[in-house]
């Protein structure tokens, strides 16, 4: 008589119990991993925008600015950089903070992360031809931009020479 092949009900139940335990342990860890990666991605996009702004200012020999933008064509957003940001050449001394001609790059918001600058960096960050950050008035511009997502935070610190660095922070 041929032998039947297959799994018994007990083997199937034990396998399902082990799978349920593994899933119960893995899912919260996976959620934390996703939240951390969203934060890292948003931070990297912002730092990339800063490096682009700085390098274009040096390359073009003129002021290049990064500003908060909700529509991708003009500066200004009620939610700050969280709605997105743009990089553009200008403005000229004494001119308003608006792209006059060419917008070099538009950065869309990255998920649910909040991106907020401190007092001097609330609405814009501007680099001059030497690679330093300067306010539109010509005064030194340095400060921090804090990026928060799901209780985690990173802070982008921009030194007086215009160089950005990233460090852990709290929301």
Image (spheres, rainbow, N blue to C red):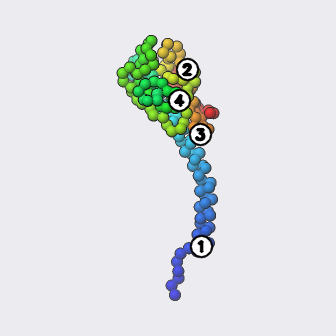
At a point 45% along the width and 19% down the height, the residue shown is: 97
Q: Which mark is residue 120?
A: 2
Badge 1 vs badge 2, beta-carbon distance below 8 Å: no
Position of residue 32 relative to residue 46, above or below, is below
At a point 57% along the width and 49% down the height, the residue shown is: 30
Question: Foreground: 70 or 106?
Answer: 70
Q: Distance between the residues labelled 3 and 2?
A: 25 Å
151 lies left or right of 48: right
Badge 3 vs badge 4, beta-carbon distance below 8 Å: no
Circle 3 residues within 10 Å: few <14, some 14–19, many ≥20:
some
Of the image marks 4 and 1, the number of the one nearer the N terminus:
1
The residue carrying mark 4 is: 79
Badge 4 vs badge 1, beta-carbon distance below 8 Å: no
The residue carrying mark 3 is: 150
Of the image marks 1 and 3, the number of the one nearer the N terminus:
1
At a point 46% along the width and 29% down the height, the residue shown is: 70
x, y percentage for residue 55? 43, 25
Look at the image and tell me in which quarter the C terminus lies.
Answer: top right
Circle 2 residues within 10 Å: few <14, some 14–19, many ≥20:
some
Question: Foreground: 97 or 125?
Answer: 97
Circle 1 residues within 10 Å: few <14, some 14–19, many ≥20:
few
Badge 3 vs badge 2, beta-carbon distance below 8 Å: no
Q: Residue 9 carries which label?
A: 1
Q: Distance between the residues labelled 1 and 3?
A: 42 Å
Q: Which of marks 4 and 1 is in front?
A: 4
């Amino acid at each position: 008589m041929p032998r039947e092949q297959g799994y018994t009900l007990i083997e199937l139940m034990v396998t399902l119990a082990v799978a349920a335990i593994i899933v119960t342990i893995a899912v919260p860890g996976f959620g934390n991993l996703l939240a951390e990666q969203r934060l890292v991605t948003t931070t990297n996009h912002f730092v990339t925008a800063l490096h682009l702004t700085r390098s274009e200012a040096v390359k073009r020999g003129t002021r290049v600015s990064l500003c908060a933008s909700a529509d991708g064509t003009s500066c200004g957003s009620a939610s700050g950089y969280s709605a997105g940001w743009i990089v553009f050449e200008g403005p000229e001394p004494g001119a308003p903070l608006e792209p006059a001609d060419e917008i070099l790059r538009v950065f869309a918001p990255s998920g649910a992360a909040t991106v907020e600058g401190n007092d001097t960096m609330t609405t814009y960050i501007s680099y001059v031809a030497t690679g330093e950050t300067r306010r539109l008035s010509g005064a030194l511009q340095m400060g921090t931009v804090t990026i928060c997502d799901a209780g985690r935070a990173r802070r982008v610190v921009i030194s007086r020479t215009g160089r950005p660095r990233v460090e852990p922070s709290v929301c």
